[in-house]
Amino acid sequence: MAHTGTYSRCLQVWFSLVVVSVPLEQVEGVWPLPQQIHQSADRYSLSPQLFSFTYGKDSAAQAGCSVLDAAFKRYFSIIFPDFTKGAENGLHYLWPEPKPFVVSVSVKSRGCDGYPDEDSDESYNLSVSNGQAVLRSVTVWGSLRGLESFSQLVYQDDYGSYFLNKTEIVDFPRFAFRGLLLDTSRHYLPLHAILKNLDAMAYSKFNVFHWHIVDDPSFPYQSRTFPDLSNKGAFHPFTHIYTQSDVMRVIEHARMRGIRVVPEFDSPGHTQSWGKGQPDLLTPCYKGDVPSGSFGPVDPTVDTTYKFMERLLKEVKYVFPDSYVHLGGDEVSFACWQSNPNVRKFMEKMGFGKDFTKLESFYMESIMNMTAALNKTSIVWQDVFDYHERPRSKYVVEVWKQGCYLCEMRRVTKAGLKVILAAPFYLDLPIPTHSWARYYIVRPLAFRGTDEQKKLVIGGEVAMWGEYVDATNLTPRLWPRACAAAERLWSDEEKTLNADLAFPRLEEFRCQLLKRGIQAEPLFVGHCKHEYNGL
Amino acid sequence: MAHTGTYSRCLQVWFSLVVVSVPLEQVEGVWPLPQQIHQSADRYSLSPQLFSFTYGKDSAAQAGCSVLDAAFKRYFSIIFPDFTKGAENGLHYLWPEPKPFVVSVSVKSRGCDGYPDEDSDESYNLSVSNGQAVLRSVTVWGSLRGLESFSQLVYQDDYGSYFLNKTEIVDFPRFAFRGLLLDTSRHYLPLHAILKNLDAMAYSKFNVFHWHIVDDPSFPYQSRTFPDLSNKGAFHPFTHIYTQSDVMRVIEHARMRGIRVVPEFDSPGHTQSWGKGQPDLLTPCYKGDVPSGSFGPVDPTVDTTYKFMERLLKEVKYVFPDSYVHLGGDEVSFACWQSNPNVRKFMEKMGFGKDFTKLESFYMESIMNMTAALNKTSIVWQDVFDYHERPRSKYVVEVWKQGCYLCEMRRVTKAGLKVILAAPFYLDLPIPTHSWARYYIVRPLAFRGTDEQKKLVIGGEVAMWGEYVDATNLTPRLWPRACAAAERLWSDEEKTLNADLAFPRLEEFRCQLLKRGIQAEPLFVGHCKHEYNGL
């Protein structure tokens, strides 16, 4: 009674896959797959009491390095969860005889107190041999990636003893921008839900948290310049907001994991929530000759709008250290602008005729110029590019529309703009929630174009919109499906295009996520040694 | 960038609905909707310190009644969560001045130590007036339903004070069987996940937990008669099983909430996991003249099979007090039987020709007879009826196949058999997970048939199969969508067919579930006063 035809087919796939998964035992047990990984059957035992992280003698970073000191502590708990829980009694280690194991980390350039950015070098080399592992990287961010891979190499046998195999890894990301969007406007996400997902992001080597903090339903960001935006525009002015301290906590939690925080202050559409706390910002819609009482997008015809945006963006620059800021620019409905006599007058004056895309472009150019003056790079949704394919300034385009997204990639890169691909990674869409493989088989560079064009594809982004998602279902809906996108964005496409081969590896990784406390849903029938126990 | 066309349409629906939801303030704030409910604007304040449950003087049940004593304690915590958490300081109650409030419960027949069954009277009357509520029912199970409704009438204002309105309720269930199936074979569900879902079931007035405990991937039930079934057939013989004590705990937790536990021991198909611990039970499949090494359904041609089933069913009778037992009988693949020369010989001997449905019917009749001899009623999946539409014995048919399920309902009831409708309530199917309305608009009796036929429809059941579901995503995938089915099965269909009207009520109820610690996912954009905080 459980099975439709679809299920039966899935079962067949599954039975054929278990055969593949059995003999692997930890070989290639790193997700996303490193660029090069060689493992042998030689395995070494680890004892928590005799295990340590240390800085290499030639390392530019030494004890006191905020990012790496914290990472050593974190990964020790991840690698030895039982030990941390106090369940360790040493008995397991009578045989094989415990030996010391040292992970030596060497970083070329220090930068322990900086922020990751678009040019950060995340490459690392990891060599695991008898009694030691040597991890080398150019930056601390590369070390973080290497520590994550190292933690995934360690496994336990049925008696709880820890092991890892002789391994050589040479690794670097395919794309510099590997983002994940969370939407805290359609539903409010409590701070701990955001922090938990930053943890999960780090496990999959995502490196950009795109914080979609503005939209029509609510504006939870407590602005120091315009406190009324959240006082009046949040779902609740005290319980459903992010204070400045909350935001700092998110940014620091992310930094510690080599993750950038790119905030989105979307305009001129998607701003209904701003209208409540900032009168005269939105365009009054008209019914015939009189205002209808409802409001449309931000009013692009009045000076006060630009003054508001300039002050807001100045605050954004101050609060968010990242060099990028997302300015939105999507899905602007022109009906309200069209109804408003002042807007029509402005159109005439500017010679825009009846083409409201020109008005939208005029507005977006203005705020992109503000952003450039603040030394920030603008990201915008593809609409901005579509309305005006000959860009006057440099900005980054995020491709989100379903359909031929590769055609759009070709057009954007042909115009010489950098591009981020989100369209095939909309994990919130109301489709079968377990279809991870469709995210896996995406090929971001499979469009006709020159090498120069391909280089302009700086990465991709998983989007988890909030219409149907809040803290109750966010984590199982994101994980492990987002991991599929993570491997696509980090690993060599040639080695990772086969979803059937990836399946047992992803199943294993999902069990690792459970063990780390991430409520990642199952891919199919089966079990993990440690089931989720956090209800 | 968030919206497809679908989303935009949803938004319109949503905006039209918020208008409806605002003025309701607690009126008809009970889910599922009672048969009759009258509320007035008169409201009374409640103070936890001066609130009590008591037994009516004329009540057959008095202090010491296990079911109701426990329910009083439970519902006090549910009604006054802040008080229970120790956050109560009495300040809220300076104004309005606190007055005592007594809920007096009167039961006609005692039965405090019994189990709910198919004939249990769940009706109740509830009258809330100044300073008191009077709850009357025939059985303790009816009192439980009334206490649940009462708890949903209480609400808090923004300062944390508790109120409820003058209310009269006359209520009874439309269907006696309101089931929910959990599948603990495809994934193991930790005990606490099952208990938590029993809580949620009680909040929606579900009254049957259908425990699908056997299937191909694993058999987690630790049998006292056949311990090897789980020793060898569970995912893990210690961590992924239900001990006898676990089962007792589930049954008692359910009983306390007026919920029956109907176990399913599905055969002859879906039994691969049994084969591991019970050699010679499954049919050896053949390739040509030699056994292929793989096994098919239970072998219905040998005596040992029936001896095994008889001993197992005797244990089931002993362990599970419910008068029903689910015997499965679905999706039997005939290929293996057909390949086996002994089975073919048996078919010839019995005069079944090449019709394997006759062999399946022969097997099912045999174990249904065993079940009847043990004084239990058999439920089977519709396949058993479909193979043999002229039943020799009485059993209950569960309709599960998609397609024209109402046609099947007509056929089954025409044959004089009782029927349970599950087909339109498959909440695990890989469809958009937020589509609650499709479960709401189901009309179980909308087939042509006599009144006698309609009476044979004893209820319906939500099925949450386990292919893609375990403890990580079970709760948000079930709730609040299962609530839609709950209202269909409890309430008057004429008053509850409009999903648009139900929407704000269900949104409100979902917030109540969150407050009670149930990880119920959102229906759409919005917020609850108390968001889920349990990550």
Image: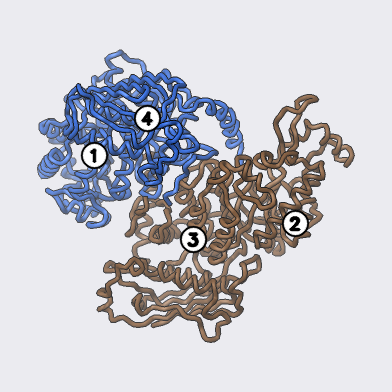
Chain colours: A brown, B blue
Judged from the image, the secondary structure of the residue bearing numbered disc 2 is: helix
In the picture of the structure, the residue carrying the numbered disc 1 is: B264
Q: CA distance from mark 4 to mark 2?
A: 61 Å
In the picture of the structure, the residue carrying the numbered disc 4 is: B99
Q: Position of residue B120 (x, y in %)?
A: 22, 25
Mark 3 or 4: in front is: 4
Q: Chain for mark 3?
A: A
Mark yes or no: residue B80 visible: yes
Tell me if residue A106 comes above or below residue A369 in the rendering: below
Q: Chain for mark 2?
A: A
Judged from the image, the secondary structure of the residue bearing numbered disc 3 is: helix
Judged from the image, the secondary structure of the residue bearing numbered disc 1 is: strand
Mark 4 or 1: in front is: 4
Judged from the image, the secondary structure of the residue bearing numbered disc 4 is: loop
In the picture of the structure, the residue carrying the numbered disc 3 is: A199
Q: CA distance from mark 2 to mark 3?
A: 30 Å
Tell me if residue A464 comes above or below residue B455 in the rendering: below
Query: Residue flagged by tag 2: what amino acid is it?
Result: Thr
Q: Position of residue A53 (x, y in %)?
A: 45, 78
Q: Are the two marked residues, 2 and 3, in contact with CB atoms closer than 8 angstroms? A: no
Of the pair A210 and A256, the residue shown nearer to us: A256
- At x 71%, y 61%, the residue is A453
